[in-house]
Amino acid sequence: MFKKFSFQENIAGQTQLKSSVQRAIRTKLQEQYPLLESILEELLPKKTPILLIKGHEHISFLSVNGEILFFQHFDGPYFPTLVLLHKYPGMLPKLQVDRGAIKFVLSGANIMCPGLTSKGARMDTDLPEGSVVAIMAEGKEHALAIGLLKMSTEDIRKVNKGIGCDNIHYLADTLWKEQVPLQG
């Protein structure tokens, strides 16, 4: 999604959200990420304005105090940025790829089922299709990508071929590189 994205070229505009819209977004984030409930007030303080930054290709970003926290494609789920995920590593369920998959994930490739089921890979929890997950790597401490499951973890184990998880945002993509403070 962010291989050729540029904040300089792909931002259409930004607006400060009304408090009613901010409440609706907080509610949606709380439903989508129940593990965030204890820190949601810290992330999105009620008295602090939230900027909605609209990009071309139907991508929008939520920014608080000049830091992009979440992004969304069309009306799909909100995805946290990797910067936010590194600050709060427990906010997403984790899948682990084996060492052989690392270079492919870091170049933007989707995660194949065998990369999630081989020795060195881990899927500890049963997750439904469409879950937002942190992609961890064997032997590494921090997440290297954020993914969206294309099939349930149960189906990934059964089928064990094809794409199991879309790579949405990864270390060294332009969203990671260009997280420049955007001011309103």
Image (cartoon, rainbow, N blue to C red):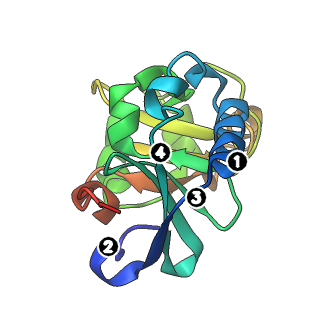
Secondary element at image label 1 = helix
Q: Nearer the viewer, residue 156 or 30?
A: 30
Which is more N-terminal, label 4 or label 1?
1
* Amino acid at dot 1: Ser
Residue at the spot of label 4: 146
In the rendered image of this protein, does residue 177 appear above or below residue 9? Answer: above
The structure residue drawn at horizontal position 32% and vertical position 41%, both measured from the top left corner, is: 83
The residue depicted at 77 percent of the width and 36 percent of the height is 128
Task: Tell us which disc is closer to us: 2 or 1.
Answer: 1
Q: From what the image shows, is residue 85 above or below residue 72? A: above
Tag 2 secondary structure: helix
Left or right position of 26 against 143? right
Picture disc at residue 72? 3
Residue 82: name its quadrant: top left
Name the disc covering residue 68, or none. none
Sequence order check, earlier mark of 2 and 1? 2
